[in-house]
Amino acid sequence: MKSQQLSSNSVYAKVAWRILPILFVVQLIGIVDRFNVGFAQLQMSKELGLSNAAYGFGAGLFFIGYFVFEIPSNMILARVGAKAWFTRILVTWGIATVAMAFVTNETWFYVLRFLVGAAEAGFAPGTQLYFSRWFPNGYRGRVNGWFLMSIPLAGMLNGPISGNILGHLSGFAGLSGWQWLFLIEGVVTIALAPLLFVILPNEPKNAGWLGKDERLIVEEGVETSRRLAHTHAIGDMLRSPRTLLMAAVYFLLLLGNYGIAFWMPQIIKGSGIADPVAIGWLAAVPSLCAFVAMPLFSRLSDAGGRKWYLVVGGLTAAIGLVITSLNSTNTTLAIVGLALTASGVLGCIPVFWAYAARVYFGPAAVVGFALINSVGNLAGFVAPSYIGIVADATGSPVNGVHAIAIGQIVAILLIAAFFDKADSQPRLEPQRL
């Protein structure tokens, strides 16, 4: 039994090292592309004449495109395979990001933000579907954690990179800094597409680097997850109150993430920091804290009790939002609050998806993951739009943070009251990965 446990650990570690790095890099670039508009706004809004409300609405339109195309995208992925579909996603979202550099007015800002979201739709739930074909649920918390550490890492890199591009390339070749920001990051995205196509296998049977016995371990692990899952059929998933509950909770949790992600540069600027390079470095601090918190939450949650790790994460985020809103002119305390918010929300995300993987499998996972993710990510439209309206009305985006904190509290209450112990299952091993 001991040798079998060690064999399983080594096989899943091998799989992880083969497929996670390229997906990690793609996710990292995707998050940078998604939130670079927050830094671009420091220059773009003045040049294009965008109000805070117009910026918030346009930034959020990404998630409307994302919402509309998320489920169709995941259904196509299930048919054509991850290799081809992820490659398509990279190329089209890279092209749309490059096009953002040539926005000339508010209307085109809205159109292209929608198109960037439509192009990227399907990647996040697609990776969860893809992981379900490689890893049993006992590993999914850590696998999700290592993969989704790309989110805070993107936050750490996005601030300094964006700040330096804005500060040092503005005016080069006749283009503004915000235009170079979209051009550079869009081209990098497109360049990743052929690399992903070469590296990524669709399923274990396509992985030439797996031996026969190793492939058998992977397939048996997937079969175990299939048997233990609550819901397999799409109809059952759609009729289940659990699906609505999970979508609502994910939406409320992500309000905290998107509430600060798009407005963090402005919040830091409002605390008294004017230099865009300094803003960029300070904006990396919350992501650094989340980078540490995310694998800790993920690994601990694989031992059981995922529900309560979600509660702790949501509570941490709510406390952070309150600290930020009450100390908006104190840079140090505002950063502390933002760090707690980022750590709490981002610590929840891999745990949430490991919980979801225990609930849905097969066709139910294809549509269910996409449905929950698309509804949850509507928070990316609601939060920046709402804060933008409040910022125009009151003069500060911080005044919109209070309602976002209430959303975290509601999420905590729903999790504590209604999430069952769907993540409890026989321990396959005390494993390391």
Image (spheres, helix red, strand yellow):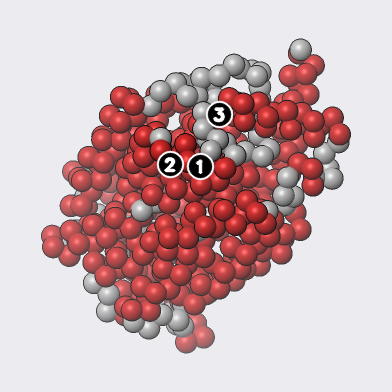
Foreground residue, 199 or 392? 199
Foreground residue, 56 or 73? 73
Mark drawn on residue 52: none
Residue 341, position in %: x, y? 34, 41
Residue with the most extreme left position: 394
Which of discs 3 and 1 lies nearer the camera? The answer is 1
Residue 350, position in %: x, y? 50, 37
Q: Residues within 10 Å of mark 3 (few under 14, many from 20)?
A: many
Q: Which comes sooner in the sequence, label 2 or label 3?
A: 3
The vertical placement of 295 against 307, above or below, is below
Residue at left offset 39%, top offset 74%: 111
Please give the count of numbered marks on the rendered protein: 3
Tell me: 232 left or right of 307: right
Tell me, yes or no, whether the two marked residues, 2 and 1, touch with CB atoms within 8 Å.
yes
- Disc 2 is placed on an element classified as helix
Q: Which comes sooner in the sequence, label 3 or label 1?
A: 3
Residue kind at label 3, given as amino acid type: Ala
Q: Residues within 10 Å of mark 2 (few under 14, many from 20)?
A: some
- Can you identify the residue that label 2 sits on? 238
Q: Quadrant of the N terminus?
A: top right
- Can you identify the residue that label 1 sits on? 234
Which of discs 2 and 3 lies nearer the camera? The answer is 2
- Can you identify the residue that label 3 sits on? 229
Tell me: 207 left or right of 29: right
Residue at left offset 59%, top offset 39%: 362
